[in-house]
Image: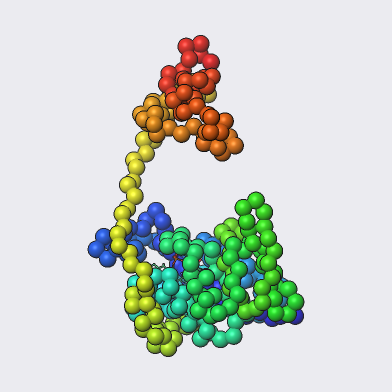
Amino acid sequence: MIVPSITVCMKVVPRPEEVRIDPEALTLDRNSARSLINPPDMNALELALQLKDRYGGTVRLLAMGPPMFDSYLRIALAMGADEAYLLSDRAFGGADTLATSHALALGIHKIGPCDLVICGEESSDGATGQVPGGVAEWLNVAQVTNAAQVDFAGDRQLRAHRELRGGYEVVVASLPAIVSMVSNSNAPRFMDMSRREWAENTPITVWDAEDLGADFELIGAAGSPTVVSGVREAEQRERRRERIEGTPEEQAHTLAEKLGLILEAVPASERTPVSLNGASHPGGDDAPEPEALSAAAPGARSLWGKPPSNGA
Ligand SMILES: Cc1cc2nc3c(=O)[nH]c(=O)nc-3n(C[C@H](O)[C@H](O)[C@H](O)COP(=O)(O)OP(=O)(O)OC[C@H]3O[C@@H](n4cnc5c(N)ncnc54)[C@H](O)[C@@H]3O)c2cc1C
């Protein structure tokens, strides 16, 4: 039976509600936001720890980013991982997904023999989902995406349930392989308090580009064929925080009136009726246009305008 050597790629991401964009550099301004471990990477770690619970072996963490990431790696060590590696060098800065996946692949290679690399499906900041595929290409190993469950099958294979719309498929891949886990596919465990002191004091291996023997044309900005040509921050909307008083009926009535006012402000040409079965024009191609629908539907006035006078 396999005693697996597993590496979990773990990205530290800024809290989305706190992140700002540096308008000059067109990059995320990390200084303005607190960070957290990318949530799907916690699912990746939990899978790795469950496999370790069942088969033994070693779970290693790999992250690329600034030195302050090490405190997040220590959280994952306290959860049950055995070793942590951080790729940190200004030369990695400005990397797009291709250059990021190249650096991570070099890190995985340098760590040593590995049976399984587990990633999250995507990060909550960049959210391309391209890095696991990139790493698989650089390392020339099998890749399984959208995995919800993974187990080893036989000596040198894994079996994974891949989530699909409306079901799942079971795939078998030869090891070594890279798996990316769908979000919320398991419940990440809490830190083990008995490991906390060890996790806080155990050394984290930090490698720079030279340690990896990297070709400087393939990492950082130089290795990135993608260019961010423009960014725009979404407009923050002020919440009104209105409180509706009265009996439940009065509250419902007032709410319907308020919604009616809001919807009336939307030009008729921009209103799209949506049916419960998901079709935007119930009744197919012959369905009446939105204006006609709103007039024809019983009780429609209560949504699009004032409530009917009979109070229904
Ligand atoms: C031109 C350009 C310049 C950029 N410059 C910078 C920059 O200077 N600094 C910067 O921080 N970002 C920069 N980025 C963003 C950076 O490319 C992405 O953050 C990175 O490639 C990961 O992509 P993603 O977030 O879409 O990850 P995804 O592909 O969505 O992530 C999927 C999984 O891959 C793994 N993973 C991804 N990134 C890492 C990581 N760093 N460490 C460990 N595991 C990881 C995780 O398991 C994650 O769940 C730049 C992007 C572009 C296009």
Residue 140 figure quarter: bottom right
Given residues 62 and 104, the one toward you in this image is: 104
Residue 119 placement (x, y as % from top left): 55, 69
Dividing the picture into quadrants, the one containing residue 6 is bottom right
* Residue at figure coordinates x 56%, y 59% from the top left: 183
Q: Residue at x 56, y 33 (%)?
A: 284
Residue 35 spot, x, y in % from top left: 42, 63
Q: Residue at x 44, y 86 (%)?
A: 212
Which corner quadrant of the figure contains ligand 1? Answer: bottom left
Query: Would residue 188 be seen by someone viewing this image from the given angle?
Result: no
- Please provide percent x and percent y for residue 3: 69, 81
| Residue 94 shown left or right of residue 184 in the figure | left
Viewer-closest of 3 and 263: 263
In the rendered image, the residue lying farthest to the left is: 24
The relative height of residue 235 versus residue 176 in the rendered view (above or below) is above
Q: Residue at x 34, y 40 (%)?
A: 238
Q: Residue furthest front?
A: 286
**121 over 244 or under it: above or below:** below
Q: Residue 70 in the image: state x and y as whole percent.
A: 45, 74
Instruction: From the viewer's side, name the closer residue of 149 and 282.
Output: 282
Q: Is residue 297 left or right of residue 52?
A: left
The residue lying toward the viewer, choosing from 269 and 217, is 269
User: Can residue 216 be seen at all in this image of the molecule?
Assistant: yes
Please indicate whether residue 273 sits to the left or right of residue 65 in the image. Answer: right
Display colour scheme: rainbow
The number of numbered discs placed on residues in the rendered structure image is 0
Q: Dividing the image into 4 quarters, which one contains the N terminus?
A: bottom right
Q: Is residue 71 above or below residue 231?
A: below
